[in-house]
Image (cartoon, helix red, strand yellow):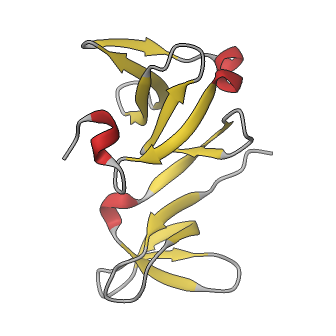
C-alpha cells in the first residue's frame, strides 16, 4: 500500500521544527499538519509530500528537499511537476535538467531543503 505522508515547517508563532502527517486548512484559514495524536499549525508554503523514495541513508525524500549525487557532486532539488502529475526528481546543472530513475536513488543524499538551506542551490 502506498504511504501518503506530508511534512511542514511549524509556524514560528507556535514553535519550531518540522511536523509530519496529513495537511489541511482549518476553518480559520490556518494550515494544519495532523498525525494520529496531535495537530500543529505549519507554514503552508513549506508543505511537501513524501515521494515514496529514500536516499542512500534510507532517509525519506520530500518535495522541497535538496539532494546531492554522491558520485559527481551535482546538487539539485526535488519538485512535484504539475504538468506530469508526478514527482520528478531532478538535478539541475548549468541550466540542464537530469532526471533520476529508480536505480539512481542509492547514489543521492539529502543535504538540506529549500526552506532552511536555499543557498545550497542558489535560491534566496
Residue 90 in sight here: yes
What is the x, y in percent for residue 117? 35, 50
94 up-or-down from 109: above or below: above
Picture quadrant of residue 27: bottom left
* Residue located farthest toward the left when viewing the structure as drawn: 124
Residue 63 in sight here: no
43 up-or-down from 15: above or below: above
What is the x, y in percent for residue 112? 46, 47
Nearer the observer, 76 or 89: 76
Describe residue 19's horizontal placement relative to residue 82 as left or right. Answer: right
What is the x, y in percent for residue 108? 60, 27
32 up-or-down from 87: above or below: below
Give the residue drawn at x 62%, y 86%. 38
Give the residue drawn at x 24%, y 13%. 95
What is the x, y in percent for residue 25? 38, 74
Describe residue 106's horizontal placement relative to residue 93 as left or right. Answer: right
Q: Quadrant of the N terminus?
A: top right
What count of labels does the image hold?
A: 0
Give the residue drawn at x 49%, y 20%. 73
Give the residue drawn at x 24%, y 36%. 122
Amino acid at each position: 500500500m502506498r504511504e501518503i505522508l506530508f511534512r511542514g515547517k511549524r509556524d514560528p508563532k507556535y514553535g519550531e521544527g518540522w511536523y509530519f502527517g496529513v495537511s489541511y486548512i482549518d476553518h480559520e484559514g490556518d494550515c494544519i499538519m495532523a498525525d494520529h495524536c496531535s495537530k500543529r499549525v505549519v507554514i503552508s508554503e513549506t508543505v511537501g509530500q513524501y515521494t515514496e523514495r529514500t536516499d542512500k541513508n534510507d532517509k525519506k525524500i520530500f518535495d522541497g528537499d535538496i539532494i546531492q549525487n554522491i558520485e559527481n557532486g551535482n546538487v539539485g532539488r526535488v519538485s512535484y511537476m504539475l504538468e506530469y502529475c508526478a514527482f520528478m526528481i531532478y538535478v539541475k546543472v548549468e541550466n540542464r535538467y537530469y532526471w533520476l530513475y529508480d536505480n539512481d536513488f542509492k547514489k543521492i543524499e539529502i543535504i538540506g531543503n529549500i526552506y532552511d538551506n536555499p543557498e545550497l542551490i542558489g535560491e534566496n
